[in-house]
Amino acid sequence: MEDIFVARVMSTSLHTVAPDTLVETAGQVMLDNEIGSVVVTDDDNQLQGILTTTDFVRIVAEQKPKDQTPVSKYMSADVVTASAQDSIRDVADLMVERGFHHVPVVDEDEGVIGMVTTSDLASYLSNEETPSPE
């Protein structure tokens, strides 16, 4: 797995929102697309943060009124990222160590280009690994 790169397993069909998007809208995007996070980007596709299903626990518990709250209030802004050339083993280790389920993949010029999720890694392993004999 050391020589397999992030580009091979990352999801590239991203759903992004602007920092001033209302949390209600971001939540609807996540529900409609059955995804666990939205990437927050600026007008140049540069990463500003990430909003995940975990963040919605805080939103529901803390914020009133919810329909007037921008995602920038709850998004994680200090986002750990990967590049398309990173080893998936390194990214998987990072995800386990930090308890992450989503790692945005960024390119210096293009901005956000993908996302590696625990589902992406599990899917890759289930397709590549041969089950052990019983």
Image: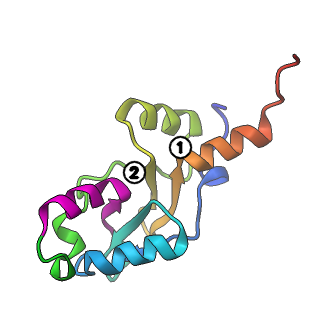
Mark 2 residue type: Thr
Start and end of the magenta stretch? 47-63
Look at 41% across and 74% down and name the residue there.
Answer: 16
Q: Does the magenta stretch include residue 71?
A: no
**Regarding mark 1 in the picture, which secondary structure is present there?**
loop
Across and down, in percent, residue 50 comes to 33, 61
Mark with earlier residue (1, 2): 2
**Mark-to-mark CA distance, 1 and 2:** 10 Å
Rendered image quadrant of residue 59 = bottom left
Report the mark closest to the observer, 1 or 2.
2
Left or right: residue 6 versus residue 69 is right
Q: Residues within 10 Å of mark 1 (few under 14, many from 20)?
A: some
Q: Compare residues 53 and 88 and report the one nearer the observer.
A: 53
Residue 41: image quadrant is bottom left
Write the residue at 29% across / 61% down: 56
Residue that label 1 marks: 86
> Label for residue 109?
none
Q: How many labels does the image show?
A: 2
Residue ID for mark 2: 81
Give the quadrant of the C terminus: top right
Count neighbours of disc 2 (C-alpha within 10 A) and say few if under 14, some if 14 to 19, many if 20 or more. Answer: some
| Residue 81 horizontal/vertical position (percent) | 39, 51
Q: Is residue 97 above or below residue 103?
A: above
- On screen, residue 31 versus residue 68, left or right, reads right
Q: Residue placed farthest to the top in the image?
A: 134
Between 3 and 81, the one nearer to me in the picture: 81
**Residue 72 falls in image quadrant:** bottom left
